[in-house]
Image: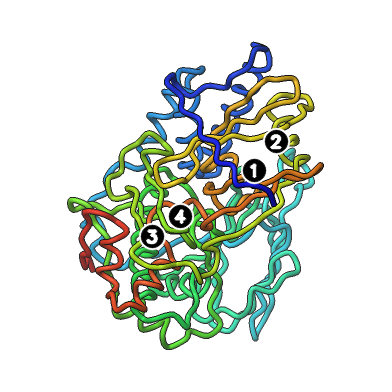
Amino acid sequence: MGRLLIKVLVFLSPLLVFSADNRLTEKVKLHLYLKGVEYLKTANYIGALEIFHFLGNYRDSQTLYRSTERFFSPIPAKVFKSEPTIRVAIARFVDLTLTCPQKAEKVFFKVPPKGAFRKISYKSGFYKKLTLKGKKGCELTINGISYGKLPIDVDIDLVEYLGSAIAVLKLPLEFYLKGVLPSEVYPSWNIEALKAQAVASRTYALFNIYRAREAGKPFDVDSTTNYQAFKIPQRILPQIAEAVDKTRGEVITYRGSLIYAMFHSNSGGCTHSFKEITGLNLPYLSRVEEKCDLKNLKWTTWNKNLSKRRVEQILASLAGRRLRITDMEIKRNSCGRGLDITLLLKDGERITLPLSVYFRLEAKIPSDWFYVIGKSGRYFLLSGRGFGHGLGMSQWGAYCLSQKGWNYKEILRFYYRGTEIEKIY
């Protein structure tokens, strides 16, 4: 595999793309800027902050940064006085069927006879929004895929959003959490780790509910890891019910406000700092060194072959032409996590990009904590630590701490510094 090479870059000037070709620099910045705008549309606010912070004074990056920053402003925990309903976007659909014992309702998304825009087609009419009354036991099928039978009565909103039709389930928040936990962690884990996940997921959901209603969005979260994973529970396991029920209404607060309770699979030994990635200081999302030995846990360490072709495709999407890459250098924080990556090109040019969100997602790398330990003709050989963005609670770290006897409140206060656990309903 060759000798381990650790390359660290230190920049004394604002983060920019370095290139002798000004036209190349401008193209890269422009397409990176457009990616930041795309992130805003898809609610990837951390990715947007990272890019606009990285671009500095380019175009209106600072204006967009400040407007995105407001998403993370404090939300008083007491605004929620009772359990709310959460609106979960579960899928984009072309055809949707709700099959109940008495009848089946079919809905389509298509072009109306005299319309220029696609609309939701139901029976003989076309709609911008439609609500189906789903009864317990009805089976939901979307685009030919069964989502199982509804375990409770559920309203299903069918709405147009950004050119697509989406199906949105309206669920009691505590029931929703019982579909989140088994999708995010292992139900067999220690009950204290499950409780920690329940409180973090509840806090995260409430934060997004408030912001979505404030912005007039037709849904609060979706069912993917863009927010937090969710599946309609066909059977609720006793330990999942216990973790949710025994923490009912409990949230994580910082100075009386809900936190943006981010979590990830495995930190690899050290969590990330929100400020290091985005420039925005959220004290409760500061860097934390694990108190537990994670070495035998899933995703603590990993190896990956990163295709040079994939990296060159990322570059081509930014530069508008193919560029040959020869090497990579990484700027790191003090515990080793990556912040920015510099790609060295065959013609001697260097292009620096934000790593923690943008490049990690584009290159499909498990985390930003990795080293290039070798090169072949077609691949960079990577050795890394952790899985996910590294912000907030490490799920495998929480599991490890629970095995050592920590309770859920101790776990949460460890990962979210300076916080309290409050019961708000």
**Residue 314 bears which disc, if any?**
2
Q: Is residue 79 above or below residue 17?
A: below
Quarter of the view holding residue 134: bottom right
Q: Which mark is drawn over residue 409?
A: none
Q: Position of residue 229 (x, y in %)?
A: 53, 64
At label 4, the amino acid type is Asp
Label for residue 220? Answer: 4
Please say if 333 is above or below 228: above
Could you tell which of marks 4 and 1 lies nearer the N-terminus? 4
| Image x and y of residue 230, in percent | 53, 67
Within-10-Å neighbours for mark 4: few <14, some 14–19, many 20+? many
Q: x%, y% of residue 267?
A: 45, 57
Front in this rendered view, residue 319 or 118: 319
**Residue contact at pointers 2 and 3, CB within 8 angstroms:** no
> Of callouts 1 and 2, which one flags the residue occurring earlier in the amino acid sequence?
2
- The amino acid pointed to by label 2 is Ile
Residue to which mark 1 is pinned: 362
